[in-house]
Amino acid sequence: MTDIFSPVRLGDIELANRVVMAPMTRDRAGPGDVPTDIMVEYYRQRAGAGLIVTEGTQPSRVGKGYWRTPGIHSEAQVEGWRKVADAVHGEGGKIVMQIMHVGRAAVQANKDADAETIAPSAIACPDKIPGPDGVPVDPVMPRALETDEIGGIIADYVTAARNAIRAGLDGVELHCASGYLPMQFLSSNSNQRTDRYGGSVENRIRFVVETLQAMADAIGPGRVGFRVCPGIKFNGMDDASPHETYAALLKAVDGKGLAYCHLMHVPMEGQDALDLVRANWTGPIIENNGLTLEKAKAVLAEGKADAVSFGYLFIGNPDLVERFRAGAPLAKANRANFYTGEGVDHVGYTDYPPMTA
Ligand SMILES: Cc1cc2nc3c(=O)[nH]c(=O)nc-3n(C[C@H](O)[C@H](O)[C@H](O)COP(=O)(O)O)c2cc1C
């Protein structure tokens, strides 16, 4: 029976335990989308996780869509992330960067005025997205990428992956969930292309397959994971057949030595999403969404996943793994401060005390 506190290896990354911190956008980056010292402290506090997956981080100025999200495309950003990685490693933790290109899920006021918004097709994201003041507004109408531009977008991901490794992180996670650029290619309703990146399932998975392969070629497959959420409707996603799309995707990237598949598990028609992943992917799996310690232990005991991730619980409990070990009560996080400290970044961010304080 797999113990949640036992070590595990995901690709080339050795975890001291199976409790992963899920990626969480917290909107605390500084000017130039550079990680701030308070972000260093936030991640350092949570280094007891077997693995931290950072907040979604844009590979380019075009890939930004939300207010104050960090980037990994400038030297200042690399230096900022180096401080984060050093702090986490100093506490004995491991950290991978989630690389998030939002594609069409962008508000112009959140990104540089001259940074355009692109997508597989010129179809606007129907869901509103918070602007700089937190008030949700309509996203930008995207420009459809030309076929010969797609290699350049993949090259941005590769540079971002190399930069993350240069900054000292242990690997990267390609964000293919939640209606951002990779999922916009995967989903039949947001991808109306007629070239080799659209139409058939084989064509719609091509962008993700090529991006994962290119990142793996650049930094080694064992340092590249990916996150999927088959069936999610967020940001206007409505794939006609998620089962077919994700079975094909998982089969295409299986056996290449990639570090892990991180499943954000939501109800899906026809088949349970974790069963779908297990049927088509033989590599390590991180299970996520709404887990408690008990549920997580059960998933591991049944051998259905290699690790489990927690989002919400890590916000209010920086020492979550120690609390789990001790059977200590868990603190509640304040939702009002998820994406803002009301002008003071540390509020609801680095001021949740450890259980011993
Ligand atoms: C404040 C907040 C920000 C999030 N940002 C991201 C993100 O940047 N990338 C991502 O893949 N998921 C993001 N998520 C989703 C979480 O990674 C996770 O899937 C979700 O919270 C469910 O897990 P939980 O029930 O343990 O919280 C975010 C969730 C929260 C609460």
Image (cartoon, grey):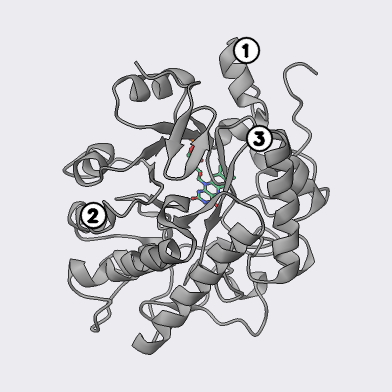
Residue 242's label in the rendered image is: 2
Q: Amino acid at mark 1?
A: Ala
Residue 205 position, x and y percent, is: 27, 66
Displayed quadrant of residue 324 = top right
Residue 20 position, x and y percent, is: 52, 35
For marks 2 and 3, the one nearer the N-term is: 3
Residue at the limit of the structure toward the top, as seen here = 327
Determine the residue positioned at 68% across, 30% down.
318
Q: Amino acid at mark 3?
A: Ala
Image marks 1 and 2: residues in contact by CB distance under 8 Å = no
The answer to whether residue 41 is above or below residue 16 is below
Q: Is residue 40 visible?
A: yes
Residue 328's label in the rendered image is: 1
Marks 1 and 3 sit apart, C-alpha to C-alpha, by 18 Å
Marks 2 and 3 sit apart, C-alpha to C-alpha, by 35 Å
Density class for disc 3 (Cα within 10 Å; few <14, some 14-19, many ≥20) is: many
- Looking at the rendered image, the disc whose residue lies closer to the viewer, 2 or 3, is 3
Residue 343 is left or right of residue 105, and the answer is right
Residue 199 is left or right of residue 142, and the answer is left
Marks 1 and 2 sit apart, C-alpha to C-alpha, by 39 Å
Q: Is residue 34 visible?
A: no
Displayed quadrant of residue 163 = bottom right
- Looking at the rendered image, the disc whose residue lies closer to the viewer, 1 or 3, is 3
Q: Amino acid at mark 2?
A: Pro
